[in-house]
Amino acid sequence: MGLWIHTDPHGRCELIPELIAGAIYPGEAATDRVLEHVLMLAESGFLTMYQTDDGREWISLAAPLKADMRTVPPSQCPPPPDQDLSRHVVAVGGAGARERARARARARARASVAQEQAARASSWAAWDENPPQRPERPMLIDAPPLGCPEHPHGTFKDCGPCGTARRRHDRWVAQERYTDQLADYEEGQGPRDYDEEEIF
């Protein structure tokens, strides 16, 4: 699409990768990208690359945008050679430029694959170093009930036995927390933090 816009109505322009990169990808270092794309488009038949006698290189799109050719001025770009001569088109930057562009693309691809493999390897290594741990049994499972036998889950009404049961429950939880904190202290790990949900 960028070449359609930045070629003349005949689909031609001089092949200067730096200028094309600046027009299509302003503010980016995209010269190598333009070289690769031009080579790919030439191989697919979308455009023809050719060189004139003065050593300048040009491209001609096989299917330029439609225009009323009666009002289009003559192209300032030389026409491409015929099909027989197009077999001897000089690649961008002279002989070997296509191979160099492909080598750069392969090098970038290898680097990208190596980076992805390294990321996956580090992920698996971290998994091996930190295997899943069995969860601890929540202390509240073993805690005494919050309420009396008539209200085992507590009640909003005044109930003396429920108040006694709640105090016994809170004392048990406090004692278990203190025991765990002392165990952590003895192991040198520091005091243990408890979530409010774990306490209540």
Image: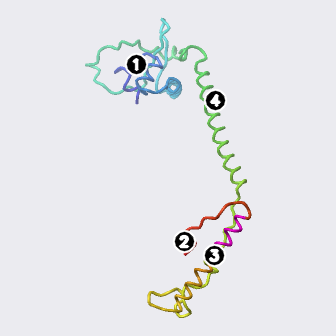
Give the residue at mark 4.
Answer: 107
Amino acid on which disc 4 is placed: Ala
- Give the Cα distance between marks 3 and 4: 58 Å
Query: Label 1, label 4: how many angstroms apart (C-alpha)?
Result: 31 Å
Please tell me whether residue 190 belongs to the stretch shown in magenta. Answer: no
| Disc 1, SS | strand
Report which residue position mark 3 lands on.
Answer: 139
Q: Which residue of the protein is positioned furthest toward the top in this rendering?
A: 54
* Label placed on residue 60: none
x then y, percent, for residue 81 = 47, 14
Residue at which label 1 appears: 12
Residue range of the region highlighted in magenta in the rendering: 176-185
Quarter of the image for residue 114 reads: top right
Q: Residue furthest bottom?
A: 150
Q: Amino acid at mark 1?
A: Arg
Q: Nearer the viewer, residue 33 or 59?
A: 33
Q: Earlier in the sequence, mark 1 or mark 3?
A: 1
Residue type (three-letter) at the residue carrying disc 2: Glu
Q: Quadrant of the N terminus?
A: top left
- Alpha-carbon distance for marks 2 and 1? 72 Å
> Residue at coordinates 71% horizontally, 68% vertically from top-left?
183
Q: Residues within 10 Å of mark 1 (few under 14, many from 20)?
A: many
Q: Which residue is mark 2?
A: 197
Picture layout, residue 160 above or below residue 59: below
* Element type at mark 3: helix
Q: Which secondary structure is most common in the magenta stretch? A: helix
Viewer-nearest of labels 3 and 4? 3
The local crowd at label 3, few if under 14, some if 14 to 19, many if 20 or more residues have their Cα within 10 Å, is some
